[in-house]
Image (cartoon, rainbow, N blue to C red):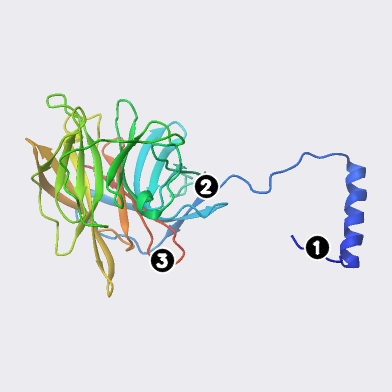
Amino acid sequence: MRIGRKPLVALVSGGIFCLLSAMVGHTEPRPYLESPTVAFRPLTGGDVRPLNPKVRYVGAYELVATGTSGLVGLSDIQVFPTADGVQAEAVSDFGAVARFTLKADGKGGYLDSLLEIDPLRGTDGKTFDNKSLADSEDLAYDPVTGRRFVSFEGVQRVMTYTDWRGAGETLPLSGLALFPSNFGMEGLTYLPDAKTGDALLIGVEAGGFWRCELASNACAPVNGPAAPGFLYMLTSLAVVDYADPVRRHEILALYRYFDPLTGPRNILRLLKYENGALTAITDLVRPKPYDNYEGVAAQKTGDGYRLYLISDSLKENGRSKLLVYDWTP
């Protein structure tokens, strides 16, 4: 810090401040920065007519963070209903996990939330020191133990975490192909199966699906449907409902299309995993306002599900969008 001669005004002001401080007595110090928060700014121009008549558009929101610049590059989201609201976790392309609460404000939006952002860590407990190692793309969890799984696209691997502030563990998966650079494991979800054993389902941006048995860490290709349109590529997978014997094998699959002239487009499709293969059931949503949506999650409601889509913004401000829909199957 460079120090020079203070102007007379500053000296006088400083003297007055010291005098007032002595008069009012000692006060507790306050931190320079408050805890980071995130606000959900409503957006207009959203979906008027989703692809499926059983889906209703709820709203679109821009995530505006205060006190941090780390809420960028979000590539997937998970939601967990609690008494205080819906707890959300989102991983980013920069190797971090963000946590915040979606609590209704009674006006059709959400209250501002405290925001926690922690860097993901390697097996040595240290943060990743380059983008290739840190490029986390999708997030899954074991509904019984709560253990989290994260797929990484740069240096291809899946890591598991029991504590977001602790070291990760790299799963010794075998049998996976070496996927093209930056077109790898965009989709990841947990498949419970009492007969054959629990597994991870991996969806590859360049095309194809893989099932990895957690008991043996062995992976094998899974027959699945083609992408929903020309140049569409997979960006996220999420089981609809682990608590429902039927819905636990129904999977939300989010696809992305990008053209530099028209910008990004997405389609949210419902798949079903049965007899070792994936089939397409129906297309649910073609999201607006347009953005680079990379993550999807579902929350059980009274008569259906609330669907959340999150984007890795392509705009200069880096602010993600959150889209919300209600779906009654």
The disc at residue 193 is none
Q: Residue at x 40, y 48 (%)?
A: 95
Residue in the image at 10% along x and 54% along y: 226
Left or right? Give the position of 67 relative to 170. Answer: right
Q: Secondary structure at mark 2?
A: loop
Say which residue label 2 marks.
112
Instruction: Quickly name the residue at label 3.
Output: 315
Label 3: how many Cα within 10 Å (few below 14, some 14–19, many 20+) = few
Q: Is residue 192 above or below residue 86?
A: above
Q: Is residue 212 left or right of residue 149?
A: left
Mark 2 or mark 1: which comes first in sequence? Answer: 1
The location of residue 24, given as percent across then percent down, is 89, 42
Q: Nearer the viewer, residue 106 or 171?
A: 171
Label 3 – label 1 distance at C-alpha: 40 Å
Look at 69% across and 44% down and name the residue there.
Answer: 31
Q: CA distance from mark 2 to mark 1?
A: 39 Å
Camera-side residue: 145 or 151?
Answer: 151
Residue 275, image quadrant: top left
Q: Nearer the viewer, mark 2 or mark 1?
A: 1
